[in-house]
Amino acid sequence: MMNILIWIHQAVDSALALVKLLQNREVGWLALNRKTGKYEREQQPLLKKLKLLLLFNPLTEWIDQTHLLRLWIHDETVRAGRKEATALSSIKIQAFVDFYHINMKDFEPSDPRAFTTFEDFFARHHAPGSRPIYEADDPTKAIVVADSRVVVYPSVSQTKAMWIKGKNFTLENLILDPERASVWSNGAVASFRLSPQDYHRYHSPVSGKVSWFQQISGDYYQVDPICLGSKVDILTRNARCCLGIETAEFGMVLFVAIGATNVGTVEIHEQCRKEGQTINKGDEIGIFQFGGSSILVAFEKDRIKFDEDLLSVSQRRVMVSVEVGMSLGVALSP
């Protein structure tokens, strides 16, 4: 009898917890908050979650061989992005801040009413000192490139086996340059996923010099793990900017900013596109416009040791919520 009562109590607790999660729109993926050490579910509109489950599953992938449904999403994304640049879009800012519990003290201006469009708000700057750079003067320490959720893997093959399932995903297809991509053959990969509520400027993980830059046009599919876990080639079909950074400590580092739903532009700043340009870790190198998006950073094989807390959680297929400037890993001698 006691066992039955315990089971009923646990069932009721689970049901109430689920109701609370739904009320708070906490239906996104589970992540470990690196600052607090607590596991949290990402806030996400329930309708969006259901739409992703409908569009990215084996049955839909089999039926929709031409990807027409997902191309419709792409077209809707482009149209939605244009609306965010209008003055009327500013009325959505305060509700957005409230829904996602954004701490505006971390940004400038801190008053949501100071932004004239939602696009301006989306591209907001951090307030000075809100994101300190880990060991700023030590070039052997790599840092997190964006406020995001990150997974790290010691090799490309592990990334593909455990996280990115697109049937044609390779670094060669990602940057459309087999010769350059050979540098990172089975190298280490850090994948950063940004949600709409995140700060959408991105920063260099290392110090070095620009070796090359390439901009690749494409679509704007979702980068939610539901999509990345499907056979649809999300990362190699989306619009993206690629940057090779030559460093003394890590060898050649690949930085790829990948657009996604509602991203109006994927941009590397003009000064960071020039061959030979010096970049210091923590420098802002580009920006996404409105929407979710993704960044992939690849290191040469055996040139980085990712932080153990990031590595151990990633091996369990769980993301870690991180902020710009946090430690990512340390350089290994060649």
Image (cartoon, rainbow, N blue to C red):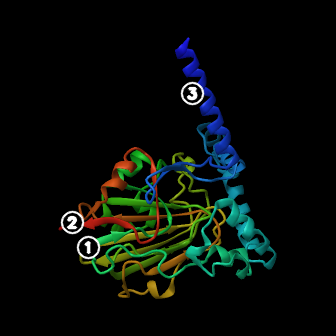
Q: Amino acid at mark 3?
A: Gln
Circle nearer the viewer, 1 or 3:
3
Q: Could you tell whether 54 is left or right of 42 in the image?
A: right
**What number is the disc on residue 10?**
3
Q: Amino acid at mark 1?
A: Thr
Q: Tell me if residue 60 comes above or below residue 202 in the rendering.
A: above
Quadrant occupied by the C terminus = bottom left
Q: Residue at x 35, y 67 (%)?
A: 327
Question: Which quarter of the picture shows residue 296?
Answer: bottom left
Tag 3, which secondary structure? helix
Q: Tell me if residue 31 comes above or below residue 77 in the rendering.
A: above
Of callouts 1 and 3, the N-terminal one:
3
Note whether residue 261 is visible: yes
| Residue located farthest toward the top when viewing the structure as drawn | 1
Q: Tell me if residue 252 comes above or below residue 196 in the rendering.
A: below
Q: Residue at x 62, y 49 (%)?
A: 26
Return the residue at label 2.
332
**What number is the disc on residue 189?**
none
